[in-house]
Amino acid sequence: MAEIRVEKLHKAFGEFVAVRESDFTVADGEFFVMLGPSGCGKTTTLRMIAGLELPTSGRILLGGEDVTFNRAAARDIAFVFQLFALYPHMNVRQNIGFPLKCEGMPRAEIRARVEETARFLRIDHLLSQPTSRLAGGDRQRVALGRAIVRRPKAFLMDEPLGTLDTEFRDLMVRELRELHMRIAATTVYVTHDQLEAMSMADKIAVMNRGDIEQFGTPQEIYDRPATMFVADFIGSPPMNFLAFRGSVEPGAASVGINGAIVDIPAPREARPEGDLALGVRPEHVRFDDGSKLRGTVFGTEYLGTTQIVTVTTAHGTVKARLPADIRAEAGETVGLSLRSERLTLFDGGSGRAIR
Ligand code: ATP
């Protein structure tokens, strides 16, 4: 396996910049997820790493070797598009062995390698079965077998669970995660699904319009979003923003929002002022009769142990995740308190977090 390093990787299609001077390193054995909305440049980045697209500028290093201009076939990377499209006219053995056959590996060696892979995935008893007769979970394992049989330096996966229904998807997320823990293969995984990303990734890059907005662990990205875009893209429901105009003195520990004093983590940088926004996750909002930050309950969404209560305030809509037994009637006026150490202050203009 190998580290993947991307340096100032840039791709323009005519005037349009699909990927802008991207920099990141995927450590050997790491599961790296590129997350972002449709059209943000995830697939283009992946295709450049795979060697299916030539960068406009920048470098790609695989295990320290510059492979920027190497042909795809010479990169020793497995590109998994649709994980589950098996060849229907072949049996399990032929499906798993197909990539090796394409490489021209001798038959006896293919046989040994396929059997070893099948044992590893606990499907060795199915080798002579036609794939059409397999149960769903076994089909997935055959597909995984076909992906890992070559023992490539790295895996690239582009929305491999794209077409699966939710139940199956959850199963496959666990299966992929378990597989990763067992073979520790360097993996770059593309998805627009934040839950998939959060549950699988060691590191995530959140992309937006060709830029990497933030690179970090799932927890860093969730707890300390670098931009309002990231804060809004991650989390369900996403982070709330309370917009206000004002200024915050360096070292100040509170801001006044329409008469309500809200404690905040003190900004370290020079005095932010102008259009600002206070970001708070729904689980860090509480009802508090004594608070001057007031709003009107708009509605509630019952989720079993918790509920999402939507409150309209003068600074924007706030969603609070509260225990299900707290009463909240639509139209009722409530006070809100925000957990001060978990707030993020953003510059309303640039959208960047002020730290
Ligand atoms: P999706 O999930 O929709 O595939 P993505 O984040 O993977 O989104 P890309 O496929 O990388 O996005 O595309 C990024 C942008 O580059 C898009 O706006 C797309 O239209 C544009 N693009 C991609 N390939 C080409 C091409 N060959 N010529 C022109 N524009 C392209």
Image (spheres, rainbow, N blue to C red):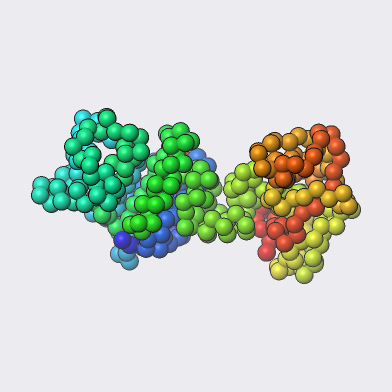
Q: Position of residue 200 (x, y in %)?
A: 46, 51
Of the pair 69 and 337, the residue shown nearer to us: 337
Q: Residue at x 85, y 57 (%)?
A: 261
Q: Is residue 247 above or below residue 206?
A: below
Q: Position of residue 278 (x, y in %)?
A: 74, 53
Of the pair 154 and 330, the residue shown nearer to us: 330
Q: Residue at x 61, y 47 (%)?
A: 235
- The quadrant holding residue 250 is bottom right
Q: Position of residue 61 (x, y in %)?
A: 34, 62
Of the pair 239 and 269, the residue shown nearer to us: 239
Q: Is residue 297 left or right of residue 168?
A: right
Instruction: Let me know if residue 101 appears in the view.
Output: yes
How many badges with numbers are in the image?
Answer: 0
Q: Position of residue 170 (x, y in %)?
A: 46, 41
Task: Write down which quadrant ligand 1 falls in.
Answer: top left
Of the pair 224 and 141, the residue shown nearer to us: 141
- The quadrant holding residue 266 is bottom right
- In the rendered image, which quarter contains the N terminus? bottom left
- The quadrant holding residue 153 is bottom left
Q: Residue at x 84, y 53 (%)?
A: 257
- In the rendered image, which quarter contains the C terminus? bottom right
Q: Is residue 211 left or right of residue 157?
A: right
